[in-house]
Amino acid sequence: MLRPLLLACTVLLAIGRPAAAFDTPARAAIVLDYRTNAILFAKNQDQPVPPASMSKLMTTYMVFEALKEGSLKLTDTLPVSEKAWRVEGSEMFVKVGDRVPVEDLVRGMIIQSGNDACIVFAEALAGTEAAFAERMTEKAKELGLTHSHFGNATGLPDPQQYMSVHDLAILAHAIIHDFPEYYHYYGEKEYTYNNIRQPNRNPLLLEGIPGVDGMKTGYTKEAGYGLVASADRNGRRLIMVLAGLESIRQRRQEGAALLEYAYREFQEYRVFQPGQTVAEAGVWQGASPKVPLVAQDVVGVTLSRDARKGMVVKMNYDSPIPAPIAKGQKLGSVEITAPGTDTVTVPLVAGQEVSKAGVVGRIAGAINYLVFGAG
């Protein structure tokens, strides 16, 4: 009978200085690490708030999905209704009765925050804005947005229109991940339509804050000033959401400060790379005496400088492992723990196939096991 031997390898990383405290006057805020989904900062993250034009991210998601599925093309033209032409608030200045190319409408919706463009899309994709809003709410549930509901496609004040900053961060992540071919529109700094030039409203993009390449601002009297921003620095992307600020200036200052804080005080610690051999386990009656255990994905966590001093990495697996062993077979796991964070568990799999040994090999292996144990 096999004798399982549980091996645990512990690695303690170097001690860094404690992370500085951060606070913000925003009603709600969050910073999310794109790759690990670690929450680096949160304030009222799940509290529903009026999202204003930040809810256009969901309208955009619906449009991008239609483009990817092929039911809509960038070269298609869509009609402008009187409702779209008359809508209040920010607009791209389409004219009633015109047919406008989809790509122009995408830029008008994203760069110019055009409410008129949003209604054109809503009516084209669902018949009415109300029907489109119902679809937005359904899509939100599919994406795991648990504190969101939509009453319109624009973000104009509506008691049925609310989102949490956490939901906005998840939605921003989904757009970047699901539609990389269209994400570049968020990084365009200006757009001219109907001879009217308008700048992108994202202050961090316009001011050239390092790495910022999107995404959306919002403002109504009820909602205050809000911002969803994403930045990529040296291959590390963060998503930040602020809601309920008092002025354009405060939005710009708080957005820049929170993003800098997150990049400065948090790091992603990569313990193992994909395909890297983490350990070698003994094999019982196999053609090879050992099998490499590898991680299929990056093994790492995002931690503050303060938390990393308590970071512990453990490798857990039984040894010896009976042959035959298939390449890719799960044989163990890596667990990463740190103060104040959830445990991250990543599977370890066989890095190569190990077939069963022949009769002579099995006898020799059994004798070796009886004499020397699992080893």
Image (cartoon, helix red, strand yellow):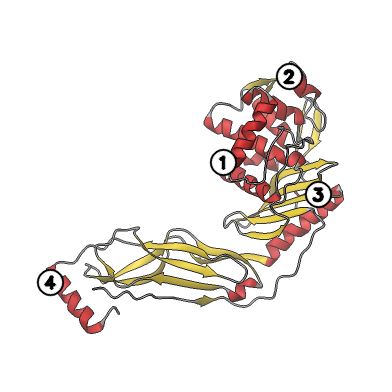
- How far separated are the C-alphas under marks 1 and 2? 30 Å
- Which quarter of the image is occupied by the N terminus? bottom left
Crowd around label 3: few <14 · some 14–19 · many ≥20 (10 Å): many
Crowd around label 1: few <14 · some 14–19 · many ≥20 (10 Å): few
Given the image, on which type of amino acid does mark 2 rest?
A: Ser
In the rendering, at what x and y percent does residue 333 appear?
43, 66
**354 lies above or below 6:** above
The reply to whether residue 330 is visible in this rendering is yes
Disc 2: which residue: 81
The mark lying in front, picked from 1 and 4, is 1
**288 lies above or below 371:** above
The reply to whether residue 121 is visible in this rendering is no
Disc 1: which residue: 142
- How far separated are the C-alphas under marks 2 and 3? 32 Å
Indicate which disc, 1 or 4, sits on the residue closer to the N terminus.
1
Report helix, strand or loop for mark 4.
helix
Circles 2 and 3, Cβ within 8 Å, touching? The answer is no
In the rendering, at what x and y percent does residue 198 appear?
80, 35
Given the image, on which type of amino acid does mark 4 rest?
A: Val
Indicate which disc, 2 or 3, sits on the residue closer to the N terminus.
2
Disc 3: which residue: 244
In the rendering, at what x and y percent does residue 255 appear?
77, 54
Indicate which disc, 2 or 4, sits on the residue closer to the N terminus.
2
- Report which quarter residue 189 is drawn in: top right
Indicate which disc, 3 or 4, sits on the residue closer to the N terminus.
3
Q: Is residue 140 left or right of residue 212?
A: left
In the rendering, at what x and y percent does residue 37 appear?
59, 56
